[in-house]
Amino acid sequence: NAGVTQTPKFQVLKTGQSMTLQCAQDMNHEYMSWYRQDPGMGLRLIHYSVGAGITDQGEVPNGYNVSRSTTEDFPLRLLSAAPSQTSVYFCASSYESFNTGELFFGEGSRLTVL
Amino acid sequence: KNQVEQSPQSLIILEGKNCTLQCNYTVSPFSNLRWYKQDTGRGPVSLTIMTFSENTKSNGRYTATLDADTKQSSLHITASQLSDSASYICVVRAKRSNFGNEKLTFGTGTRLTIIP
């Protein structure tokens, strides 16, 4: 079982560059989300989607874009990378978002912006 | 403001010993609380979920408790093993309002290290 797959695992960018973090899940989950994890802070929600074609902002959306054209894929785009976006990014999916939904996380993507 | 506080921040214990991790929250209205285990360099994995009506739940050597009145939860690990070395994250879900967004509040985690 692949579960939630994130690519790349590691990436180094220069300030101002753009890139896309890929996320794919094979569990037919409607709900997908992106989080960033920084030292000393809890996971923070960037964007989420409750189904194909539907996305919404989370707690820290600035500097990031998302789209959801299929149930399986939920890419996260950094438009113009800044050092403050240096972090570990996790994609997560769930059967249900508003009840008891367990989040299934990917392995993470470690991004460094110089 | 909804908050989740975990203690201690870090803990080192000998293999075979027991330990208890704490989670205090101010999330309201409360829906459920999950404990996740995050191995170094990996994504978090759910260990257990606690709902309002549950006081204790076990998953192997892991036992979670919930006191909804005092808004506290604990995760007790019995007979620790080297593989228990990880961060343990407490996540509290608030009940969704009619027009509200998804509401999860994450704790910062407890870093547990088991030494042989």
Image (cartoon, rainbow, N blue to C red):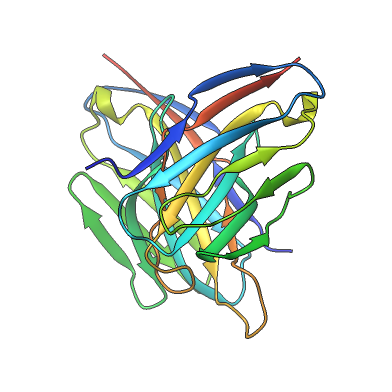
* Residue B87 percent location from the top left of the image: 44, 34
Q: Quadrant of residue B45?
A: top left
Q: Residue furthest bottom?
A: B98
Q: Residue at 31% across / 50% down in the picture? A: A26
Q: Nearer the viewer, residue A31 or B107?
A: A31
Q: Quadrant of residue A81?
A: top right
Q: Residue furthest left?
A: B60
* Residue A104 percent location from the top left of the image: 38, 50
Q: Quadrant of the C terminus of chain A?
A: top right
Q: Residue furthest front?
A: A69
Q: In the image, is B25 to the left or to the right of A99?
A: right
* Residue A87 percent location from the top left of the image: 64, 29
Q: In the image, is A21 to the left or to the right of B19?
A: right
Q: From what the image shows, is residue B66 above or below residue A64?
A: below
Q: From what the image shows, is residue B64 above or below residue B79?
A: below
Q: Nearer the viewer, residue A52 or B27?
A: A52
Q: Is residue B71 visible?
A: no
Q: In the image, is A7 to the left or to the right of B63?
A: right
Q: From what the image shows, is residue B53 above or below residue B6?
A: below
Q: Is residue A113 visible?
A: yes
Q: From what the image shows, is residue A53 above or below residue B35?
A: below
Q: Residue at 47% across / 42% down in the picture? A: A23
Q: Nearer the viewer, residue B20 or A60?
A: A60
Q: Residue at 47% across / 68% down in the picture? A: A97
